[in-house]
Image (spheres, rainbow, N blue to C red):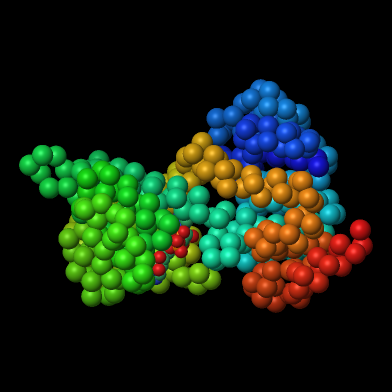
Amino acid sequence: MIIGIPKEIKNNENRVALTPAGVAEFKKNGHSIYVQASAGENSGFSDKAYADAGAEILPTIADVYSIAEMIIKVKEPIASEYPLIKKDQLLFTYFHFASSESLTHAMIERQAVCLAYETVEKTDRSLPLLVPMSEVAGRMSIQEGAKYLEKPLKGKGILLGGVPGVAPAKVLVLGGGIVGTQAAKMAAGFGAQVTIMDVSLARLRYLSDVMPANVTTVMSNHYNICEAIAQTDLVIGAVLIPGAKAPHLITRDMLKLMSPGTVVVDVAVDQGGCIETCTPTTHENPTFIIDDIVHYCVANMPGAVPYTSTLALTNATLPYALQLANKGWKKACVENEELKKGLNVANGKIVYKGVADAWGLPFNDVETVLQNELQLN
Ligand SMILES: NC(=O)c1ccc[n+]([C@@H]2O[C@H](COP(=O)([O-])OP(=O)(O)OC[C@H]3O[C@@H](n4cnc5c(N)ncnc54)[C@H](O)[C@@H]3O)[C@@H](O)[C@H]2O)c1
């Protein structure tokens, strides 16, 4: 198959969809890879590294779209890319269709085949292509929180791990899923005194088993949160209710319970945030202050560490991308339920119910569409 890797052009997106190691894997499987010049530059991969691994470097994004049967990307195509997409071209990337009606219509019109990273789903309902970014954001939340606790950045001026003779900082992690677990591990590693709250007793049991002694597990409820935030230096928001907005576990009036210079890092801000006063910020301007509480609410945290994020993402996407290239999307989706769940749009039809419902558009059963497509060939 002919595979194209365009340079990401969405604002502040420094990741790339394939590393030179990934190029070598595709070559080993007999495929041709075309990479846009400087596509990997911001993630630390030179054109020479791609060429040495067997890719051909093309000068423009239009060249890549025009030659490729499958485009592998990181972010959804933006408006300037729409006209470049060809009928039947397979696009494997994050789409988040339910948050963009114009993108949904554009992909239907272009008659592309859209396989969305975010809906590839394992039988245990986990989302293997979202996990790596949650891992990055969870670990990073503590790094950022520690930084903003410094006095010149308007924090309390407390060192996360303390020093001999001085108590460490107290960290509260709301939500013990992927983000929360990674955050708690990092904070514990720094030597902080960590509390992790979740509504799932099973999850708390597991965390209690695997976390070090400086992590305490507590049931998440309003009473416990009010008690905890009065003594906390750093709060990490890591709650997710699938398919719904995050619940506001810390409301505006609860900020007064917290001491000045406390830092809140609301990782869940991309789902509305679990701290009421959090609104999305950017890496250029990551924080704001309300009632003396420092709010860090960057909606795309992994974007700041493209080297790690690119490797983490491609480690997870490559095995799926190889299946798509080796078998073609139809056979790969028929044989692999996880990939089938990733199909959102196929040749002008929406085949993912959540997307059809989000925009009131007709839904087509994915099995029927796949069978029809296979019969046509
Ligand atoms: N800002 C970013 O750059 C960035 C990056 C990655 C992920 N995220 C976001 O981080 C959030 C968490 O993602 P995740 O992968 O850890 O999800 P997850 O599903 O693994 O974990 C969510 C956890 O929240 C718990 N929970 C639900 N309601 C709760 C409540 N009332 N109190 C306490 N816990 C509660 C669940 O039981 C679950 O354990 C998501 O909104 C995700 O989109 C943001």
Instruction: Estimate the x, y position of residue 202 in percent, counting from the top left.
Output: 36, 69
Instruction: Estimate the x, y position of residue 302 in percent, counting from the top left.
Output: 48, 46
Instruction: Estimate the x, y position of residue 165 in percent, counting from the top left.
Output: 7, 42
Q: Is residue 340 above or below residue 222?
A: above
Q: Which is more toward the observer, 57 or 130?
A: 130
Judge from the rendering whether residue 207 lies leftward or rightward of residue 325; answer left or right.
Answer: left
Say which quarter of the image contains residue 246: bottom left
- Please state, as top left, top right, bottom left or bottom right, where the N terminus lies in the image: top right
Question: Which residue appears at 86% of the width and 63% of the height?
Answer: 373
Judge from the rendering whether residue 46 lies leftward or rightward of residue 287; answer left or right.
Answer: right
Ligand 1 picture quarter = bottom left
- Please state, as top left, top right, bottom left or bottom right, where the C terminus lies in the image: bottom right
Question: Which residue appears at 22% of the width and 64% of the height?
Answer: 229
Q: Which is more toward the observer, 36 or 194?
A: 194
Judge from the rendering whether residue 299 lies leftward or rightward of residue 26; answer left or right.
Answer: left
Q: Is residue 181 above or below residue 144?
A: below
Q: Is residue 189 above or below residue 225?
A: above
Instruction: Estimate the x, y position of residue 163 in percent, counting from the top left.
Output: 14, 39
Residue extending farthest left: 165
Say which quarter of the image contains residue 117: bottom right
Q: Which is more toward the observer, 121 or 195?
A: 121
Question: Which residue appears at 38% of the width and 51% of the height?
Answer: 182
Say which quarter of the image contains residue 277: bottom left
Q: Is residue 224 visible?
A: yes
Q: Is residue 296 visible?
A: no
